[in-house]
Image (cartoon, rainbow, N blue to C red):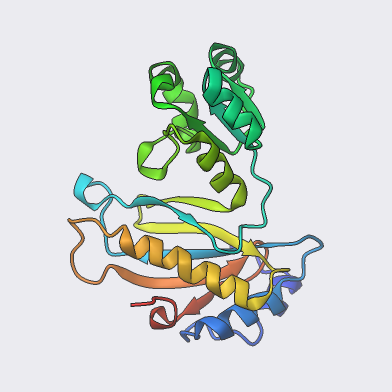
Amino acid sequence: MAKEGKRIRAAREGIDPTKLYGLDEAIALVKSKANAKFDETVEISMNLGVDPRHADQMVRGVCNLPNGSGRTVRVAVFARGAKADDARAAGADIVGAEDLLEIVQGGKIEFDRCIATPDMMPLVGRLGKVLGPRGLMPNPKVGTVTMDVKGAVGAAKGGAVEFRVEKAGIVHAGIGKVSFDQQKLVENIKAFADSVAKAKPAGAKGTYIQRIAVTSTMGPGVKVEPSTVLTA
């Protein structure tokens, strides 16, 4: 096992790995331990009491962070005619149909979110093997297959964060930057946790949200007392 560097050991000082911190204290610790030379992302991880191998225990959704994510999100839209014009007016970075299909098939994927109008899905469906593994395939459940492309582009640019449970039952997402005010990070985390709570699947048994931790890109994880995060 590789030895921990001095920076990691120093960052972990003052953090009790066995303690569950209140959300405010946890965020304060994360901010104080973020010492990279860039504006680190604050991330949340949630262990859920689900087995996503079963269809009735899949967790997926989208959260509109009240204070944005701090990320510059590049948005691609598959649309034609007036809807394509709406997408451009809303600030989409790439808009197209067959021409965009060819670009993506050629391996050029210069976007972080992909939106499509319903009539474009037979075309976009051809890209399932390319977009699917990257988590970019448009899906009506998260609002990326819609006729309201203006609203979808605005949400993506404004801080909408998609989430999907992984095989181990974990959901994680970036919910802001360490440069954000503490209260804004707290509000974003509570909004994200609330969205995950509302996405509880019918097949979930026992305790749904089991563990929560927050961290920064290069910082140590801090365990959080779930009751200080969840609104209900």
Q: Is residue 185 visible?
A: yes
| Quadrant of the frame with the N terminus | bottom right
Spot occupied by residue 131 in the image (x, y as percentages of width and height): 49, 29
Spot occupied by residue 200 in the image (x, y as percentages of width and height): 27, 60
Relative placement, left or right, of 195 versus 29 is left
Relative placement, left or right, of 118 versus 7 is left
Q: Is residue 110 visible?
A: no
Whether 72 is drawn above or below 229: the answer is above
As drawn, which residue projects farthest toward the front? Answer: 82
Along the line of sight, which residue is nearer the eye, 48 or 72?
Answer: 72
Whether 168 is drawn above or below 90: the answer is below
Spot occupied by residue 30 in the image (x, y as percentages of width and height): 64, 75
Q: Residue at position x 24%, y 56% from top?
A: 201
Q: Residue at position x 51%, y 81% from top?
A: 23
Along the line of sight, which residue is nearer the eye, 114 or 51?
Answer: 114
Q: Residue at position x 44%, y 24% from top?
A: 129
| Quadrant of the frame with the C terminus | bottom left
Quadrant housing residue 132: top left
Relative placement, left or right, of 174 versus 38 is left
Query: How many labels were placed on the picture?
Result: 0
Spot occupied by residue 181 in the image (x, y as percentages of width and height): 68, 74
Q: Residue at position x 54%, y 67% from top?
A: 188
Quadrant housing residue 67: bottom right
Whether 70 is drawn above or below 154: the answer is below
Quadrant housing residue 142: top left
As drawn, which residue projects farthest toward the right? Answer: 37
